[in-house]
Image (cartoon, coloured by chain):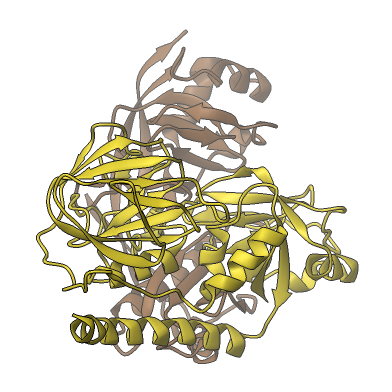
């Protein structure tokens, strides 16, 4: 159950120089991104987030938020000088060894299609696949949680097979039911609670993705690998 | 205990919000006008993390079921305790059985009610504030309704002189004047993609006023200007964490200011960030009002925050002494 990603590579090797911007006086935003998601960059981001959380010398840090190939660090600017924070984050990017990211494997049971998976039929048609083959392709892939965000517990996942990539809906739905298993662009995800979304809905899981009273509240964490397990495919 | 007699769905138990959970997708939330919350708490002798009530729908009525010290801060509302007028930014004693009525402010959007002890709702993810979008925190994760009964933490409150005590933050008279004139200024710092906007767009951002549209709530305000803001080249960004106060520019070019309950990740380019010391002002700006962005540097942003911090610290240190002397 507890696999560990353990990759060692020379610091900064082959990666393009990131840009560090201030996000207000109390924030530094490190943007390492190119057009596509790069998981080797992401492993460095995760390692930086760990280092920043564990470094007790950094007084005044309030939030460390890994995004997709980027990192937002928020702090109290009355206790930590923003220029010094920016320098620290840039230096950390150079020095960090990607190290070990804890990774659990999480299986998500899914009822595909029908009313819970209202877009499945159209998606399959657009991909030129039979519904069964679409489900087979979606559920045989291995996904990885890149970061959490947007709404509580929402996991942005990489690993969606290219054949299934589909641009987001031109206008978002005002309410997508919690537990909906979705795809959007090149990403996959499960929406934890009822919320608006422009992603396509393939099915639904009964798993509780986010519960603020649970410890930890999130079912999925960055680095976790995810598989979708078909329970049923509805017409 | 306090019993709600009249309320609306946007009246919420709020505190300073959640810190340390942004990486899980949990937004900061908390009071839209945090300066008013801080003063409401200070004026009744509460700790800074106590929960009060953010009132955005009026009239709001409640009955005190125990003796308490209270203060209403924020908009310049008409406030009555059993029919007798109480000034905003003023703490008073209420006896069990007395009724408090807060009317719609002439200027400003929100009133914050602080009560000695603070509203006793369960601590969830480190805070007591309501996350309305996610539906948790505060009082059952929702706005207050008629006949809701709110518990208070035990507290004796400040030992007040008979007429009570008050303190208006130095920034408030200026904001009320701007609200009356229909144009509020907030200070901003350039954000990550600032340099990628055209020179005309940057000029427009700081030149003309922007109107707050009807699409304005705890998540953010959509703004409308005469002409859209444009980048020199369109660029797709990967999802990234954002801060309350960030001014995003979607492809259509009309900016959005993300606020307390914003999604924690965004993808739109960011042109500016409203400085932390001015976020409370936005909590008082109604739809239809104009906003003007004033560019400042980091030193000015920090100085403004330090001034607020020092003022509040001084108030907290001096209130008990002043109260004692006046008794």
Q: Quadrant of residue A16?
A: bottom right
Is any atom of residue A147 visible in this view?
no
Residue B187, percent from left and from top: 65, 74
Q: Residue furthest top?
A: A235
Q: Is B110 placed above or below A87 here?
A: above
Is any atom of residue B318 visible in this view?
yes
- Chain in brown, by letter, is A
Q: Nearer the viewer, residue B140 or A4?
A: B140
Residue B86, percent from left and from top: 36, 58
Q: Which quadrant would the C terminus of chain B be assigned to in this image?
A: bottom left
Q: Is residue B49 left or right of residue B260?
A: left
- Chain in yellow, by letter, is B
Q: Is B63 placed above or below A199 here?
A: below
Residue B162, percent from left and from top: 22, 69
Q: Is A215 placed above or below A5 here?
A: above
Q: Residue at the spot x=20%, y=72% of the render?
A: B160
Q: Nearer the viewer, residue B52 or B325?
A: B325
Disc tally is 0
Q: Quadrant of residue B41?
A: bottom left
Residue A41, percent from left and from top: 52, 68
Q: Quadrant of residue A230?
A: top left
Q: Residue at the spot x=42%, y=50% of the render?
A: A144
Q: Nearer the viewer, residue B103 or A48?
A: B103
């Amino acid at each position: 159950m507890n696999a560990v990603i353990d990759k060692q590579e020379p610091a900064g090797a082959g990666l393009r120089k990131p840009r560090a911007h201030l996000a207000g006086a109390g924030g530094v935003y490190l943007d390492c991104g190119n057009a596509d998601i790069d998981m080797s960059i992401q492993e460095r981001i995760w390692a930086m987030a760990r280092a920043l959380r564990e470094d007790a010398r950094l007084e005044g840090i309030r939030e460390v938020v890994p995004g997709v190939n980027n990192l937002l660090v928020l702090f109290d600017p009355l206790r930590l000088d923003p220029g010094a924070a920016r320098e620290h984050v840039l230096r950390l990017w150079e020095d960090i060894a990607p190290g070990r990211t804890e990774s659990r494997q999480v299986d998500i049971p899914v009822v595909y299609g029908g009313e819970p998976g209202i877009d499945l039929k159209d998606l399959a048609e657009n991909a030129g696949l039979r519904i069964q083959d679409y489900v087979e392709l979606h559920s045989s892939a291995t996904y990885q949680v890149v970061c959490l965000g947007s709404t509580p517990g929402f996991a942005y996942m990489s690993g969606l097979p290219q054949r299934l990539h589909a641009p987001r809906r031109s206008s978002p739905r005002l309410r997508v039911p919690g537990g909906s298993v979705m795809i959007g662009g090149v990403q996959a995800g499960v929406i934890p609670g009822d919320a608006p979304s422009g992603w396509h809905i393939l099915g639904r899981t009964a798993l509780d993705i986010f519960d603020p009273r649970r410890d930890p509240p999130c079912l999925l964490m960055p680095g976790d690998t995810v598989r979708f397990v078909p329970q049923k495919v509805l017409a | 205990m306090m019993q709600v007699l009249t309320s609306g769905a946007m009246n919420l138990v709020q505190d300073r919000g959640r810190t340390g959970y942004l990486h899980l997708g949990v937004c900061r939330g908390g009071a839209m006008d945090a300066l008013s919350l801080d003063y409401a708490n200070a004026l009744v002798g509460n700790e800074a993390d106590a929960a009060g009530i953010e009132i955005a729908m009026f009239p709001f009525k409640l009955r005190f079921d125990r003796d308490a010290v209270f203060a209403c801060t924020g908009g310049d509302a008409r406030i009555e305790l059993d029919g007798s007028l109480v000034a905003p930014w003023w703490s008073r004693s209420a006896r069990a059985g007395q009724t408090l009525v807060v009317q719609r402010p002439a200027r400003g959007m929100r009133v914050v009610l602080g009560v000695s002890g603070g509203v006793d709702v369960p601590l969830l993810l480190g805070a007591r504030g309501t996350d309305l979008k996610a539906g948790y925190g505060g009082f059952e994760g929702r706005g207050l309704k008629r006949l809701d009964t709110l518990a208070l933490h035990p507290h004796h409150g400040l030992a007040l002189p008979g007429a009570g005590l008050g303190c208006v933050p130095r920034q408030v008279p200026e904001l009320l004047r701007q609200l009356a004139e229909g144009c509020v200024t907030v200070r901003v710092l350039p954000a990550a993609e600032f340099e990628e906007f055209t020179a005309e767009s940057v000029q427009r951002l700081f030149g003309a006023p922007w109107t707050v549209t009807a699409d304005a709530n705890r998540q953010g305000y959509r703004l409308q200007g005469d002409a859209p803001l444009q980048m020199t080249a369109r660029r797709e960004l990967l999802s990234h964490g954002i801060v309350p106060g960030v001014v995003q520019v979607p492809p259509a070019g009309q900016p959005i200011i993300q606020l307390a309950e914003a999604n924690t990740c965004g993808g739109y380019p960011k042109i500016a960030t409203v400085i932390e010391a001015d976020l409370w002002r936005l909590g008082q700006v109604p739809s239809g009002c104009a906003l003007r962005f004033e560019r400042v540097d980091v030193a000015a942003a920090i100085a403004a925050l330090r001034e607020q911090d020092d003022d509040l610290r001084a108030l907290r240190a001096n209130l008990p002494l002043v109260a004692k002397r006046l008794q």
